[in-house]
Amino acid sequence: MPLVTQFKSVFPSGQYVLKDGTAAVFMNHIHRTTNPKHIEELKEAIKDGHPQISGGEEIDTELESPIAGLKAKIRSEFLAELAAKGQLATNPNNDMGGTQDINSAFGALTSEGNNTAPTSVTVAGNTAKTVPMAKVAGGK
């Protein structure tokens, strides 16, 4: 859950120039940041009584809207259910096999002309039938 620090401005939009030369841009009265130096400087400005800036609360952006909060709740419940059943992807019993080298799976393609790659594929449909590779690739 991404935590950001949110600051508010009395003006709908504006900029506060920080000591390092960058600007804290406020859009729709809000500026959000995760940069610790910017957070410290803006909190210091608030503490010193800056008339246009307030806030400095950490908020969870996933829980900001009701829909995002509901999604996060459902996601955590679902993952907890999978973990209880031992069905998470980290379960070694769920191994679906490794990758297979394409040359060993389909035959080696060489420039010497001894191409052992398949020349036809099986197309699924009502009845399986073999179609030449040229047709699959858009040829005649």
Image (cartoon, rainbow, N blue to C red):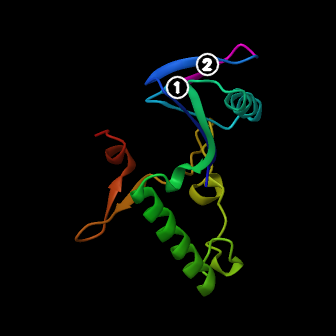
Q: Which corner quadrant holds the C terminus? A: top left
**Mark-to-mark CA distance, 2 and 1:** 8 Å
> Is residue 119 a member of the stretch shown in magenta?
no
Residue positioned 55% across, 24% down in the render: 52
Q: Nearer the viewer, residue 127 or 8?
A: 8
Badge 1 marks a residue whose secondary structure is strand
Q: Nearer the viewer, residue 117 or 80?
A: 80
Give left or right: position of 49 versus 122.
right
> Within 10 angstroms of label 1, few (less than 14), some, or many (20 or more) residues?
many
Residue positioned 46% across, 23% down in the render: 11
Q: Position of residue 117 (x, y in %)?
A: 54, 51
Q: Which residue is mark 2?
A: 16
Residue type for callout 2? Tyr
Q: Which residue is mark 1?
A: 26
Answer above or below: position of 4 versus 30.
Answer: below
> Is residue 22 a member of the stretch shown in magenta?
yes
Residue positioned 67% across, 30% down in the render: 46
Range of residues picked out in magenta: 20-25
Q: Nearer the viewer, residue 134 or 97?
A: 97
- Proximity of marks 2 and 1: CB atoms separated by less than 8 Å: yes
Q: Position of residue 88 (x, y in %)?
A: 62, 75
Q: Position of residue 60 (x, y in %)?
A: 58, 52
Seen from this angle, which residue lies furthest top? 21
Give left or right: position of 4 versus 119.
right
